[in-house]
């Protein structure tokens, strides 16, 4: 039985991240989609997989091999701070009554 409780991730859609492990280690990209229920993220242009697509003339779909972005575990990526341009962990602080994400290295806000 799957636990459907809401989980949160340290990354959000639109964040710039760097991959820390695997074949794409060291590469950067923007988070295209965050999947909190599975603790995974999809990063633009990284973790590319080949998928066979069957042609469907009724829908205008051309068959062949397509490259798609596969999900990556969220624990295998780190946020790149926009201020200091370094990969960093995330801290949470309350500023003006709002809980915001903050860079551990320089202290700048990560949320715009």
Image (spheres, rainbow, N blue to C red):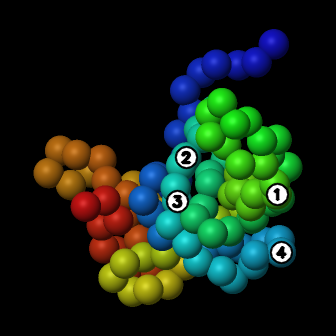
Depth check: give the residue in front, 110 or 60.
60
Which tag, 1 or 3, sits closer to the chain's start? Answer: 3
Percent x, y for residue 72?
A: 72, 56
Q: Which residue is mark 3?
A: 31
Distance in Å between CA atoms under marks 1 and 4 = 21 Å
Residue found at x 74% / y 61%: 67
Which tag, 2 or 4, sits closer to the chain's start? Answer: 4
Distance in Å between CA atoms under marks 2 and 4 = 20 Å
Q: Left of 94 or right of it: where is 4?
A: right
Q: Quadrant of residue 95?
A: bottom left
Residue found at x 41% / y 71%: 103
Distance in Å between CA atoms under marks 1 and 3 = 24 Å
Question: Does residue 109 lie above or below 62 as drawn?
Answer: below
Residue found at x 66% / y 30%: 58
Q: Are marks 2 and 4 in contact (CB under 8 Å)?
A: no
Secondary structure, mark 3, is strand
Q: Is residue 59 visible?
A: yes
User: Label 2 crowding class (10 Å Cα cut-off): few <14, some 14-19, many 20+?
Assistant: many
Distance in Å between CA atoms under marks 2 and 1 = 25 Å
Residue at the farthest left position: 96
Residue at the farthest top position: 1
Percent x, y for residue 18?
A: 60, 74
Secondary structure, mark 1, is strand
Query: Mark 1 or mark 3: which is in front?
Result: 1
Q: Which mark is on residue 65?
A: 1
Which tag, 2 or 1, sits closer to the chain's start? Answer: 2
Q: Quadrant of residue 106?
A: bottom left
Query: Mark 2 or mark 1: which is in front?
Result: 1
Q: Which mark is on residue 102?
A: none
Q: Is residue 78 visible?
A: no
Q: Which residue is mark 4?
A: 23
Distance in Å between CA atoms under marks 3 and 2 = 7 Å
């Amino acid at each position: 039985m799957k636990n459907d409780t809401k989980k949160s991730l340290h990354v959000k859609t639109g964040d710039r991240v760097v991959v820390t492990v695997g074949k794409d280690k060291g590469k950067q990209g923007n988070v295209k989609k965050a999947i909190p229920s599975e603790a995974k993220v999809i990063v633009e242009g990284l973790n590319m997989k080949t998928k066979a697509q069957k042609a469907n003339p009724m829908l205008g779909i051309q068959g062949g091999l397509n490259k798609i972005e596969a999900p990556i575990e969220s624990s295998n990526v780190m946020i790149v701070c926009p201020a200091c341009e370094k990969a960093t962990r995330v801290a949470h602080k309350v500023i003006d009554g709002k809980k915001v994400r903050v860079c551990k290295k320089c202290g700048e806000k990560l949320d715009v």
